[in-house]
Amino acid sequence: MSTTCLGGYGDRARFSFYRTCDMIRFYSEYTGVKYPWPNYKHVAVSEFIYGGMENTTVTIVTDTTLHDEHAHCPGSRFPCPGMEDFTSDGLVAHELAHQWFGDYVTTKDWANIWLNEAFATYFEALYMEHAKGRDEFLYELYQNLRNYLNEYGNRYARPIVTRLYRDPEEMFDRHTYEKGSLVLHTLRNLLGDETFRRGINLYLTRHAHGNADTEDLRKALEEVSGQPLDWFFTQFVYSSGHPPVIKYSWGYDPGNKLVKLSISQAQGGDDSYPIYRLPLEFEIKYPSGKVDIFKFELSEREATIYIPASERPQYICIDPQFKVGVKSVSADKGVEEAIAELSSENMPCRA
């Protein structure tokens, strides 16, 4: 990859785009589809109102993404992995992912635009895991959830796939980007990474240089997994309303040495999906240092579970590895338990 810059920005370009080749290698390996074009270029444009806009082989970005060495590596010399203060990695990774999801295969219509934007948002996060570790990856997904819930709480709720809009621009919202990325993450954890990757490969190769819709994605994933996934897409893609609101509380019975774990789905009675099917995990930490992972599929409005335990837990954390990205959690938790949870090895528990 070569860089040619005018206007005195040549030195800055190398800070913003230096991971591009590694991103191309990562996406090619993850999807099993080699970068499909002969070259790739960035064009930085003054007063560009968007962060970036992909075109086949060329991505236009705002010139404000060009920064100097101090902004990238304050107090250090470039490169400074793990010490970056301001990088363009997220923007570059997102727009590059569109070369596969949006250019190589693109949506049939605006109703299915999440197939372009959610994949680019999720693959941006996947690259962060590859380059900067799992905590960075999970924290980015955690931020995606917060952004989506903010739009839900302050603006509206809609199905990810919908044809009810006045202008296509309305589809470029937090439901398409952030919620869509969390749906893909949940799906990846449900199927397993290897199966998910084989499904994405089939989706891309089957529809190469053509158009696809959400049903094409579902069929590809069902084919490689051998699992029916209509229930999953009905819950998370075709239904509107709030994602599942999970409330949980627990108590300890020292006489019988049992933890009583109470779980409920508390989403409202608007147009929310009534009862979700959710594969959940709980991290249980004991004073002895022992950590157990309890797995349970919630498929009813309320459930009570009794778990054998020789000592009272220090804390119980729901979904410690953030495998179910599309959810809101409310827990009856005291200060001591919350402080103890900061010792967890899993970032979602600490967050």
Image: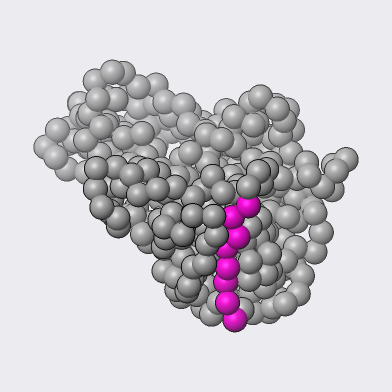
- Residue at the extreme right of the image, as rendered: 166
Q: Is residue 112 left or right of 51 when viewed as pictured?
A: right
Q: What residue is shown at x 52% (from left), y 41% (from top)?
A: 144
Q: 260 above or below 228?
A: above
**Residue at the (52%, 67%) spot, across then down:** 4
Position of 66 with respect to 50 (left or right) is: left
| Residue displayed at 75% across by 56% down | 112
Direction top: furthest residue: 335
Q: Is residue 172 visible?
A: yes
Residue 22 located left or right of residue 54: left
Q: Which residues are magenta?
A: 38-45
Comparing 82 with 349, the one in front is: 82
Q: Residue furthest front?
A: 7
Measuring from the top left, give residue 148's x and y in whole percent: 59, 37
Q: Nearer the viewer, residue 289 or 237?
A: 237
Magenta stretch encompasses residue 87 = no
Query: Residue 256 at what x, y percent from top left?
Result: 23, 30
Q: Dominant secondary structure of the magenta stretch? A: strand
With respect to residue 192, does 296 lie above or below? above
